[in-house]
Amino acid sequence: MSNAVTFDTRTDTAIPVESPLAFSYRQSGAPRAGSSSRVQLRERAMLGHLILRGGAIVLDEAVRDVLGISLPGKPQALVQDTSGERSIQWLSPDEWLVIVPGGEEFPLETQLRERLGNSHYAISDVSGGQTALEITGEAARELLMKAVIYDVHPSNFPVGKGVTTVFAKATTILRRPSEERWELVVRRSFADYCYRWLLDAAAEYSVNVEQ
Amino acid sequence: MFYIYCPYCGEHREEEEFHPKGQAHIERPKDPEACSDEEWGNYLFFRNNPRGVHHEMWVHAVGCRKFFNVTRHTVSYEILETYKMGEQPSITADSQKQPREPAAVSHQEGVRA
Ligand SMILES: [Zn+2]
Protein backbone atom coordinates (compact mmCIF):
# COMPACT_ATOMS: atom_id res chain seq x y z
CA MET A 1 0.00 0.00 0.00
CA SER A 2 1.27 3.40 -0.90
CA ASN A 3 1.33 6.18 1.67
CA ALA A 4 -0.82 8.51 -0.44
CA VAL A 5 -3.53 10.26 1.52
CA THR A 6 -6.94 9.52 0.02
CA PHE A 7 -10.51 10.34 0.93
CA ASP A 8 -13.96 9.47 -0.32
CA THR A 9 -15.51 12.51 -1.94
CA ARG A 10 -18.99 11.03 -1.47
CA THR A 11 -19.95 11.53 2.12
CA ASP A 12 -22.91 10.20 4.06
CA THR A 13 -23.84 13.59 5.42
CA ALA A 14 -27.01 15.12 4.08
CA ILE A 15 -25.44 17.73 1.84
CA PRO A 16 -27.59 18.27 -1.22
CA VAL A 17 -25.69 17.10 -4.30
CA GLU A 18 -26.49 18.57 -7.67
CA SER A 19 -25.37 17.55 -11.12
CA PRO A 20 -23.45 20.17 -13.11
CA LEU A 21 -26.58 20.64 -15.21
CA ALA A 22 -29.02 21.24 -12.35
CA PHE A 23 -28.73 24.99 -12.83
CA SER A 24 -29.03 24.66 -16.62
CA TYR A 25 -32.30 22.72 -16.37
CA ARG A 26 -33.78 25.51 -14.24
CA GLN A 27 -32.34 28.32 -16.34
CA SER A 28 -32.64 26.96 -19.88
CA GLY A 29 -35.23 24.22 -19.48
CA ALA A 30 -35.22 20.69 -20.80
CA PRO A 31 -37.21 20.43 -24.02
CA ARG A 32 -39.42 17.39 -24.51
CA ALA A 33 -40.12 16.61 -28.14
CA GLY A 34 -41.54 13.12 -27.87
CA SER A 35 -41.61 10.93 -30.95
CA SER A 36 -40.80 13.72 -33.43
CA SER A 37 -37.34 14.08 -31.89
CA ARG A 38 -34.32 13.19 -34.00
CA VAL A 39 -31.75 13.81 -31.25
CA GLN A 40 -31.91 12.75 -27.63
CA LEU A 41 -29.73 14.31 -24.97
CA ARG A 42 -29.16 12.84 -21.54
CA GLU A 43 -26.68 13.64 -18.82
CA ARG A 44 -25.02 10.63 -17.30
CA ALA A 45 -24.60 12.43 -14.01
CA MET A 46 -22.66 11.51 -10.88
CA LEU A 47 -20.50 8.82 -12.45
CA GLY A 48 -17.08 8.04 -11.03
CA HIS A 49 -14.24 9.48 -13.12
CA LEU A 50 -10.62 8.56 -12.40
CA ILE A 51 -7.50 9.68 -14.22
CA LEU A 52 -4.71 7.09 -14.23
CA ARG A 53 -1.19 8.14 -15.06
CA GLY A 54 1.89 5.98 -15.32
CA GLY A 55 3.52 3.31 -17.40
CA ALA A 56 1.14 1.20 -19.49
CA ILE A 57 2.58 -2.16 -18.42
CA VAL A 58 2.43 -1.49 -14.68
CA LEU A 59 -1.08 -0.02 -14.85
CA ASP A 60 -2.39 -2.70 -17.21
CA GLU A 61 -1.65 -5.52 -14.75
CA ALA A 62 -3.31 -3.70 -11.88
CA VAL A 63 -6.35 -2.61 -13.89
CA ARG A 64 -6.86 -6.12 -15.25
CA ASP A 65 -6.74 -7.60 -11.76
CA VAL A 66 -9.05 -5.06 -10.18
CA LEU A 67 -11.42 -4.09 -12.96
CA GLY A 68 -11.19 -7.05 -15.32
CA ILE A 69 -10.59 -4.81 -18.34
CA SER A 70 -7.25 -4.49 -20.03
CA LEU A 71 -5.79 -1.03 -20.45
CA PRO A 72 -6.13 0.21 -24.04
CA GLY A 73 -2.59 0.67 -25.35
CA LYS A 74 -3.58 1.99 -28.76
CA PRO A 75 -4.09 5.74 -29.20
CA GLN A 76 -7.74 6.88 -29.19
CA ALA A 77 -8.95 3.50 -27.96
CA LEU A 78 -11.95 3.09 -25.68
CA VAL A 79 -12.68 -0.25 -24.01
CA GLN A 80 -15.65 -1.27 -21.88
CA ASP A 81 -16.64 -4.21 -19.73
CA THR A 82 -19.48 -6.44 -20.93
CA SER A 83 -22.14 -4.38 -19.15
CA GLY A 84 -20.84 -1.20 -20.78
CA GLU A 85 -20.95 0.56 -17.42
CA ARG A 86 -17.20 0.61 -16.82
CA SER A 87 -14.84 2.00 -19.41
CA ILE A 88 -11.22 2.96 -19.89
CA GLN A 89 -10.13 5.43 -22.51
CA TRP A 90 -6.66 6.23 -23.81
CA LEU A 91 -5.98 9.96 -23.39
CA SER A 92 -2.23 10.11 -23.93
CA PRO A 93 0.68 7.62 -23.93
CA ASP A 94 0.74 7.72 -20.12
CA GLU A 95 -2.79 8.80 -19.23
CA TRP A 96 -6.17 7.06 -19.15
CA LEU A 97 -9.71 8.01 -18.15
CA VAL A 98 -11.67 5.42 -16.20
CA ILE A 99 -15.42 5.90 -15.85
CA VAL A 100 -17.37 3.67 -13.45
CA PRO A 101 -20.85 3.82 -11.89
CA GLY A 102 -21.11 6.52 -9.21
CA GLY A 103 -19.81 5.38 -5.84
CA GLU A 104 -17.44 2.77 -7.27
CA GLU A 105 -14.60 5.20 -7.83
CA PHE A 106 -13.26 5.35 -4.28
CA PRO A 107 -13.18 1.58 -3.68
CA LEU A 108 -11.59 1.23 -7.13
CA GLU A 109 -8.95 3.84 -6.35
CA THR A 110 -8.18 2.14 -3.03
CA GLN A 111 -7.89 -1.27 -4.65
CA LEU A 112 -5.66 0.06 -7.41
CA ARG A 113 -3.39 1.75 -4.89
CA GLU A 114 -3.13 -1.48 -2.89
CA ARG A 115 -2.30 -3.39 -6.03
CA LEU A 116 0.20 -0.84 -7.38
CA GLY A 117 2.15 -0.44 -4.12
CA ASN A 118 5.19 1.72 -4.60
CA SER A 119 5.19 1.77 -8.40
CA HIS A 120 5.50 5.09 -10.17
CA TYR A 121 1.94 6.18 -10.95
CA ALA A 122 -0.77 8.71 -10.10
CA ILE A 123 -4.51 8.36 -9.65
CA SER A 124 -6.77 11.39 -9.44
CA ASP A 125 -10.48 11.34 -8.70
CA VAL A 126 -11.94 13.92 -11.08
CA SER A 127 -15.60 12.89 -10.64
CA GLY A 128 -16.57 16.31 -9.33
CA GLY A 129 -14.82 18.15 -12.13
CA GLN A 130 -16.51 16.76 -15.18
CA THR A 131 -19.69 15.16 -16.41
CA ALA A 132 -20.80 12.95 -19.29
CA LEU A 133 -23.47 13.94 -21.81
CA GLU A 134 -24.98 11.22 -23.94
CA ILE A 135 -26.20 12.03 -27.45
CA THR A 136 -28.36 9.53 -29.35
CA GLY A 137 -30.79 9.63 -32.24
CA GLU A 138 -30.60 9.61 -36.02
CA ALA A 139 -29.31 13.20 -36.24
CA ALA A 140 -26.66 12.77 -33.52
CA ARG A 141 -23.78 12.73 -35.98
CA GLU A 142 -25.16 15.70 -37.89
CA LEU A 143 -25.36 17.63 -34.64
CA LEU A 144 -21.75 16.78 -33.78
CA MET A 145 -20.58 17.85 -37.23
CA LYS A 146 -21.75 21.36 -36.40
CA ALA A 147 -19.86 21.59 -33.14
CA VAL A 148 -16.76 19.39 -33.22
CA ILE A 149 -13.69 20.02 -35.39
CA TYR A 150 -12.89 16.30 -35.44
CA ASP A 151 -14.11 14.15 -38.33
CA VAL A 152 -16.99 12.05 -36.97
CA HIS A 153 -17.65 10.08 -40.15
CA PRO A 154 -17.91 6.34 -39.33
CA SER A 155 -14.85 5.62 -41.46
CA ASN A 156 -12.80 7.88 -39.18
CA PHE A 157 -14.74 7.41 -35.96
CA PRO A 158 -15.69 3.77 -35.42
CA VAL A 159 -17.27 2.41 -32.25
CA GLY A 160 -14.63 2.06 -29.53
CA LYS A 161 -12.85 5.30 -30.33
CA GLY A 162 -12.49 8.38 -28.17
CA VAL A 163 -10.60 11.63 -28.69
CA THR A 164 -9.86 14.81 -26.80
CA THR A 165 -10.77 17.64 -29.10
CA VAL A 166 -12.51 20.97 -29.47
CA PHE A 167 -16.28 21.15 -29.06
CA ALA A 168 -17.70 24.60 -29.72
CA LYS A 169 -14.35 26.15 -28.72
CA ALA A 170 -14.33 24.24 -25.43
CA THR A 171 -12.08 21.28 -24.66
CA THR A 172 -14.01 18.06 -24.54
CA ILE A 173 -13.63 14.32 -24.74
CA LEU A 174 -15.74 12.82 -27.49
CA ARG A 175 -16.28 9.07 -27.51
CA ARG A 176 -18.38 6.50 -29.21
CA PRO A 177 -19.24 3.60 -26.89
CA SER A 178 -21.72 1.99 -29.26
CA GLU A 179 -23.14 2.26 -32.76
CA GLU A 180 -25.93 4.67 -31.85
CA ARG A 181 -24.48 6.38 -28.76
CA TRP A 182 -22.02 9.27 -28.56
CA GLU A 183 -20.64 10.66 -25.32
CA LEU A 184 -19.19 14.05 -24.50
CA VAL A 185 -17.16 14.38 -21.33
CA VAL A 186 -17.12 18.07 -20.47
CA ARG A 187 -15.65 20.09 -17.66
CA ARG A 188 -18.09 21.01 -14.93
CA SER A 189 -17.43 24.71 -15.45
CA PHE A 190 -18.23 24.31 -19.16
CA ALA A 191 -21.25 22.04 -18.70
CA ASP A 192 -23.85 24.82 -18.82
CA TYR A 193 -22.22 26.41 -21.88
CA CYS A 194 -22.04 23.07 -23.70
CA TYR A 195 -25.62 22.21 -22.74
CA ARG A 196 -26.96 25.49 -24.06
CA TRP A 197 -24.88 25.14 -27.23
CA LEU A 198 -26.34 21.67 -27.73
CA LEU A 199 -29.91 22.86 -27.15
CA ASP A 200 -29.42 25.60 -29.71
CA ALA A 201 -27.65 23.45 -32.28
CA ALA A 202 -30.11 20.57 -31.86
CA ALA A 203 -33.26 22.71 -31.95
CA GLU A 204 -33.70 21.99 -35.66
CA TYR A 205 -33.77 18.25 -34.87
CA SER A 206 -36.42 18.71 -32.15
CA VAL A 207 -34.08 17.79 -29.35
CA ASN A 208 -35.49 15.75 -26.50
CA VAL A 209 -33.77 16.09 -23.13
CA GLU A 210 -34.16 13.22 -20.71
CA GLN A 211 -33.64 14.17 -17.10
CA MET B 1 -5.18 25.73 -41.85
CA PHE B 2 -2.64 23.04 -41.00
CA TYR B 3 -3.51 19.42 -40.65
CA ILE B 4 -0.78 18.23 -38.29
CA TYR B 5 0.33 14.66 -37.65
CA CYS B 6 0.73 14.10 -33.89
CA PRO B 7 3.36 11.38 -33.41
CA TYR B 8 1.79 10.37 -30.09
CA CYS B 9 -1.86 10.25 -31.23
CA GLY B 10 -0.76 8.62 -34.48
CA GLU B 11 -3.06 10.63 -36.71
CA HIS B 12 -3.55 14.00 -38.38
CA ARG B 13 -5.42 16.58 -36.31
CA GLU B 14 -6.67 20.11 -36.85
CA GLU B 15 -4.29 23.00 -36.21
CA GLU B 16 -6.76 24.40 -33.65
CA GLU B 17 -5.69 21.62 -31.26
CA PHE B 18 -2.01 22.65 -31.32
CA HIS B 19 0.23 25.46 -30.11
CA PRO B 20 3.70 26.29 -31.42
CA LYS B 21 6.32 26.50 -28.68
CA GLY B 22 9.41 27.88 -30.37
CA GLN B 23 12.70 26.47 -31.52
CA ALA B 24 13.40 22.79 -30.83
CA HIS B 25 16.54 20.99 -29.67
CA ILE B 26 17.69 23.72 -27.27
CA GLU B 27 19.88 22.10 -24.69
CA ARG B 28 20.34 23.62 -21.24
CA PRO B 29 24.04 24.00 -20.48
CA LYS B 30 25.12 21.12 -18.25
CA ASP B 31 26.99 23.39 -15.88
CA PRO B 32 25.39 26.86 -15.87
CA GLU B 33 27.93 28.19 -13.36
CA ALA B 34 30.72 27.52 -15.83
CA CYS B 35 29.02 29.42 -18.67
CA SER B 36 30.25 32.76 -19.87
CA ASP B 37 27.63 35.51 -19.96
CA GLU B 38 27.53 35.15 -23.71
CA GLU B 39 26.90 31.40 -23.60
CA TRP B 40 24.18 31.78 -20.99
CA GLY B 41 22.62 34.70 -22.86
CA ASN B 42 22.60 32.70 -26.07
CA TYR B 43 20.90 29.80 -24.32
CA LEU B 44 18.25 32.00 -22.71
CA PHE B 45 17.44 34.63 -25.30
CA PHE B 46 18.80 33.98 -28.77
CA ARG B 47 16.92 31.87 -31.29
CA ASN B 48 17.43 30.94 -34.92
CA ASN B 49 15.28 32.68 -37.47
CA PRO B 50 16.10 30.84 -40.68
CA ARG B 51 14.60 31.39 -44.07
CA GLY B 52 13.82 27.78 -44.97
CA VAL B 53 13.87 24.60 -42.90
CA HIS B 54 13.25 25.16 -39.19
CA HIS B 55 12.92 22.67 -36.35
CA GLU B 56 10.39 23.75 -33.77
CA MET B 57 8.50 22.41 -30.79
CA TRP B 58 4.73 22.14 -30.83
CA VAL B 59 2.33 20.91 -28.20
CA HIS B 60 -0.87 18.97 -28.84
CA ALA B 61 -2.63 21.23 -26.35
CA VAL B 62 -6.18 19.97 -26.89
CA GLY B 63 -5.44 16.30 -27.33
CA CYS B 64 -2.73 14.18 -25.75
CA ARG B 65 -1.02 17.33 -24.37
CA LYS B 66 2.40 16.04 -25.39
CA PHE B 67 5.21 18.14 -26.82
CA PHE B 68 6.75 17.00 -30.09
CA ASN B 69 8.98 18.36 -32.85
CA VAL B 70 8.04 19.74 -36.24
CA THR B 71 10.30 20.39 -39.21
CA ARG B 72 8.68 23.28 -41.04
CA HIS B 73 9.63 25.42 -43.99
CA THR B 74 9.35 29.07 -42.94
CA VAL B 75 8.74 30.34 -46.48
CA SER B 76 6.18 27.85 -47.76
CA TYR B 77 4.91 26.95 -44.24
CA GLU B 78 5.02 23.34 -45.38
CA ILE B 79 5.38 20.85 -42.54
CA LEU B 80 8.01 18.42 -43.74
CA GLU B 81 7.84 15.97 -40.84
CA THR B 82 6.89 15.58 -37.19
CA TYR B 83 8.76 13.45 -34.67
CA LYS B 84 8.71 12.62 -30.98
CA MET B 85 10.71 14.36 -28.27
CA GLY B 86 14.22 12.94 -27.99
CA GLU B 87 14.33 11.96 -31.66
CA GLN B 88 16.38 13.65 -34.36
CA PRO B 89 14.98 15.16 -37.57
CA SER B 90 15.40 13.21 -40.79
CA ILE B 91 15.01 16.38 -42.85
CA THR B 92 17.42 19.27 -42.24
CA ALA B 93 18.45 22.39 -44.12
CA ASP B 94 21.46 20.46 -45.47
CA SER B 95 19.47 17.45 -46.59
CA GLN B 96 17.02 19.77 -48.32
CA LYS B 97 19.76 21.15 -50.58
CA GLN B 98 20.11 17.76 -52.24
CA PRO B 99 17.28 16.70 -54.54
CA ARG B 100 14.51 15.33 -52.39
CA GLU B 101 14.01 11.59 -52.47
CA PRO B 102 10.44 10.37 -52.58
CA ALA B 103 11.26 7.99 -49.70
CA ALA B 104 11.55 10.97 -47.36
CA VAL B 105 7.90 11.75 -47.93
CA SER B 106 6.26 9.38 -45.49
CA HIS B 107 2.63 9.28 -44.45
CA GLN B 108 3.64 11.44 -41.52
CA GLU B 109 4.12 14.42 -43.73
CA GLY B 110 1.89 17.36 -42.90
CA VAL B 111 -0.48 18.77 -45.45
CA ARG B 112 0.26 22.09 -47.06
CA ALA B 113 -1.60 25.11 -45.71
ZN1 LIG C 1 -1.49 14.08 -29.74
Image: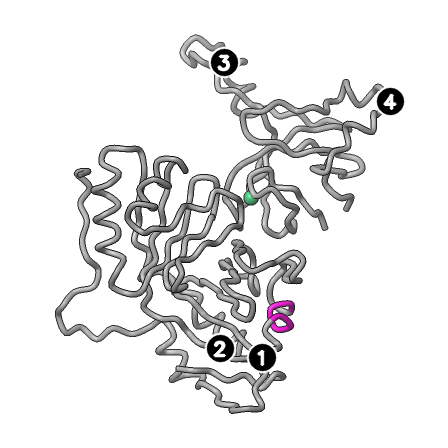
Q: Is residue A59 magenta?
A: no
Q: Position of residue B100 (x, y in %)?
A: 84, 25
Find numbered disc 2 in the image and state the secondary structure of the residue it sits on: strand
Query: Callout 3 environment at 10 Å: few (<14), some (14 to 19), or many (20+)?
Result: few
- How far apart marks 2 and 3 lie (CA) works out to 61 Å
Disc 2 to disc 1: CB gap under 8 Å: yes
Residue with the mark numbered 2: A41
**Can marks 1 and 4 be said to lie on one chain?**
no
- How far apart marks 3 and 4 lie (CA) works out to 41 Å
Residue at the (45%, 13%) spot, across then down: B30
Residue at the (84%, 19%) spot, across then down: B98
Nearest to viewer (mark 2 / mark 1):
2
Q: Give the quarter of the image for residue A168.
A: bottom right
Dominant SS of magenta comes to: helix
Find numbered disc 1 in the image and state the secondary structure of the residue it sits on: loop
Residue with the mark numbered 1: A202
Disc 1 to disc 3: CB gap under 8 Å: no
Q: Earlier in the sequence, mark 2 or mark 1?
A: 2
Find numbered disc 3 in the image and state the secondary structure of the residue it sits on: helix
Nearest to viewer (mark 1 / mark 3):
1
